[in-house]
Amino acid sequence: MTVLNTIKNRRSIHNFKEELVDLEMLKEIFTYGSYAPSHYMKEPWEIKLFQEDGKVQFVHAIIESYQRLGMIRNDEEPKTIKMKDSMKKFLLSIPHHALIYFQKEADPVRQEEEYAAVCAFIQNSQLAAWEYGVGMLWTITPYMQDPEFYRAVDLHAAEVKIAAVMQIGYPKSIPRDKGRTPIEEKLEIIE
Ligand SMILES: Cc1cc2nc3c(=O)[nH]c(=O)nc-3n(C[C@H](O)[C@H](O)[C@H](O)COP(=O)(O)O)c2cc1C
């Protein structure tokens, strides 16, 4: 598998087998991720990996945040209970959730540098994972803006920013390649 094939063939995975990925393999995947470029070699990425019983606290924090944000009703109606249960079941069925965060910077240029480096780390990790047969889904969700959610996962919203939550596991199915817009439509050559 060449890096070019991996770039083209990797897909975002939405259905995972209920099977843990070996921790040593995940460490290798994130080690490849960390070969991402970062200004001043800051390597700003930090990872909280939720798996097995650790997922219970994480999923609870997500559901509470969705209730605070009004995305799930805050009542005990059967419809609400059903919705919470199905969300819980779905999130708990995903073998690993990797919360990727970094230290906030007061200087907006530095903040952008750190975020860009973290995104490079995430994509490197996704590509490395693909080579190991492991799938990921890069997610950005409203709870990442909720300071109470940060507290629930032992982080401080004033100090750190959550860049993404990666869902991780062996793919149950692989979506089709949706293709891409021809680059000529994105490329303006000034000469
Ligand atoms: C920053 C970012 C955030 C994303 N957030 C979500 C998300 O919240 N939910 C989701 O299903 N996919 C999410 N995706 C995955 C995209 O839907 C996916 O990359 C796109 O459809 C192209 O599919 P592919 O990755 O299989 O080529 C996100 C991707 C990026 C880069």
Image: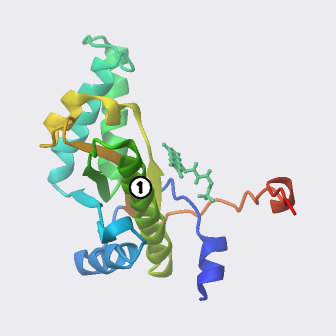
Q: Which quarter of the figure is the C terminus placed in?
A: bottom right
- Regarding residue 26, the answer to whether it shows in the image is yes
Q: Which amino acid does the dot numbered 1 rest on?
A: Glu
Residue 16 seen by the camera: no
Ligand 1 within 8 Å of disc 1? The answer is no
What quarter of the picture does the N terminus occupy? bottom right
Furthest residue to the bottom? 1
Task: Please tell me which residue is depicted at 25% across the width and 12% down the height of the picture.
Answer: 76
Quarter occupied by residue 98: bottom left
* Percent of width and height locating residue 9: 64, 72
Q: Characterize the local packing of mark 1: few (<14), some (14-19) or many (20 or more) Cα atoms within 10 angstroms.
A: some
Q: Height in image: 127 above or below 76?
A: below
Q: Position of residue 21 (x, y in %)?
A: 31, 72
Foreground of the two, 89 or 184: 184
Q: Is residue 7 above or below residue 180?
A: below
The percent coordinates of residue 56 (x first, y second) are: 18, 44
Element at label 1: helix
6 or 18, nearer to the observer: 6
Which image quadrant is residue 143 in?
Answer: top left
> Which residue sits at x=59%, y=69%?
10
Give the x, y percent position of residue 73: 33, 14
Q: Residue at x 30, y 59 (%)?
A: 96
Taking depth in this image into account, of 8 and 188 the one nearest to the observer is 188
How many numbered badges does the structure rendering display?
Answer: 1
**Scheme by which the image is coloured:** rainbow
Q: On the image, numbered disc 1 is attached to which residue? A: 113
Left or right: 147 in relation to 39? left
Name the side, left or right, on which 26 lies relative to 148: right
Q: Quadrant of residue 107?
A: top left
Residue at (86, 60) in percent of width and height: 184
74 in relation to 186, above or below: above
